[in-house]
Amino acid sequence: MTVAAGPAWRSADPKTLWRLRGDALPGPAGPHDHATVADVLQLVTEHPSTQAFPPNVRSRATRGARAILDWINSSPGAGWRDRWVASGADRGMDWISAVIAHSQAVPLANDRQIVQAGFRALMLVHVLRPSYDCLAQYRSSATATLRRYLGVAAFGKVESAGVTLGLTGSLAHRSRVVCC
């Protein structure tokens, strides 16, 4: 029996993968790590990506961000980054269900969409900087928004690295979301 070789990234030099992937831990605390909930929600409301939508869609990002902040605010920590990690949210995407269960601000009709809109908004304003492991499980159509507001150059570097490593399909997509 012949065993097919796995994807190129599995056999790539570990130092190359580490450099491309970055630390598995969440990014460093953002510039608004000690901001109040009200200040963070103001950042979300004023961000160009939020302003681009009609008011009913704009309110999803704000409600989702509030629900996430209220939930992680119940965890110990000096700032949003510490509380995010202490909440266990950085281990994957299962935390969305916990936010929904905890929140009074998210209606049941489109709860996951609202929380995901808030998650995207909190990343865009650099309040949340999730780990590679968390983002590797993040499935969203928000890649275009992240590309637009976080920088096309960063996406270009990731795409070039993905080609070098032979990443295709969903792995290539996830590398763009995770690294950018």
Image (cartoon, rainbow, N blue to C red):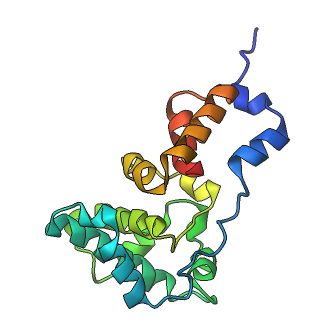
Left or right of 110: which side holds 121? right
Q: Residue 18: percent from the left, percent from the top?
A: 77, 47
Q: Is residue 62 above or below residue 162?
A: below
Q: Is residue 148 above or below residue 40?
A: above
Task: Name the outermost residue toward the top.
Answer: 1
- Between 172 and 108, the one lying in front of the other is 172
Residue 139 appears anywhere in the view: no
Q: Residue 31: percent from the left, percent from the top?
A: 57, 78
Write the residue at 48% across / 53% down.
Answer: 138
- Between 165 and 71, the one lying in front of the other is 165
Write the residue at 59% across / 82% down.
Answer: 83
Write the residue at 58% across / 64% down.
Answer: 130
Counting labels gives 0
Q: Residue 5: percent from the left, percent from the top?
A: 73, 18
- Dividing the picture into quadrants, the one containing residue 160 is top right
Quadrant position of the N terminus in the picture? top right
Residue 47 appears anywhere in the view: yes
- Between 54 and 133, the one lying in front of the other is 54
- Dividing the picture into quadrants, the one containing residue 153 is top right
- Dividing the picture into quadrants, the one containing residue 116 is bottom left
Write the residue at 20% across / 64% down.
Answer: 57
Q: Is residue 96 above or below residue 156?
A: below
Q: Is residue 131 above or below residue 3?
A: below
Left or right of 98: which side holds 114? left
Q: Residue 96: percent from the left, percent from the top?
A: 43, 67
